[in-house]
């Protein structure tokens, strides 16, 4: 890679500030649970920790060095993968029997089918903070 140290530092700063996709995976190697944090767009950039916070902190602490090393080697640095804008609308096909069941449960709960499905999908995705605002009767588990 050509250029000056100043150019390299500018590039490192540029890439270090980008919003890359970072994921956390809980692992169990038979000796105990630990956490693996990695950046999807930057292959090989990953760190582990005893806690999620430790794994993320360790990942951040080596990110600039990883970027600098790859730039020095002349490796092409990818830009972050940006998620498409989501409208919140989905067309969903399902068996008529499931449609009937969902509609019946929504009616019993006193909410619209749409609100019940948002609640059920949110709960299934681990997003319990999404609440049914139109609900007239408390949701029964």
Image (tube, helix red, strand yellow):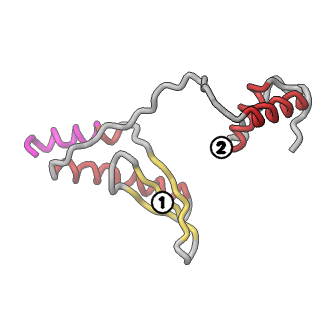
> Count of labels shown?
2
Q: Badge 2, how many Cα within 10 Å: few under 14, some, many 20+?
A: few
Of residues 134 and 32, which is closer to you in this image?
134
Q: Position of residue 48 (x, y in %)?
A: 46, 62
Res. 101 image quadrant: top right
Residue position marked by numbered label 1 in the rendering = 36
Of residues 69 and 84, which is closer to you in this image?
84
The residue at the point 88 percent across, 31 percent down is 109
Q: Position of residue 51 (x, y in %)?
A: 56, 61
Q: Residue furthest toward the bottom?
A: 31
Res. 11 image quadrant: top left
Tag 2's secondary structure?
loop
- The disc label shown at residue 125, or none: 2
Above-or-below relation of 51 to 22:
below
The residue at the point 76 percent across, 31 percent down is 99
The label nearer to you, 2 versus 1, is 2
Above-or-below relation of 7 to 22:
above
Res. 141 image quadrant: top right
Earlier residue among tags 2 and 1: 1
The residue at the point 22 percent across, 51 percent down is 70
Residue 21 located within the stretch drawn in magenta = no
């Amino acid at each position: 890679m050509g250029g000056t140290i100043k150019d390299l530092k500018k590039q490192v700063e540029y890439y270090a500030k980008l919003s890359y996709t970072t994921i956390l995976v809980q692992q169990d190697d038979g000796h105990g649970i630990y956490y693996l944090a990695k950046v999807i767009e930057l292959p090989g950039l990953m760190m582990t920790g005893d806690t999620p916070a430790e794994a993320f902190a360790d990942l951040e602490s080596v990110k600039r060095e990883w970027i600098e090393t790859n730039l020095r080697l002349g490796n092409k640095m990818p830009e972050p993968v940006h998620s498409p804008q989501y409208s919140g609308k989905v067309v969903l096909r399902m068996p008529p029997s499931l449609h009937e069941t969902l509609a019946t449960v929504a009616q019993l709960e006193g909410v619209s089918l749409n609100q019940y499905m948002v609640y059920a999908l949110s709960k299934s995705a681990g997003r319990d903070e999404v609440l049914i605002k139109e609900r007239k009767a408390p949701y029964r588990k």
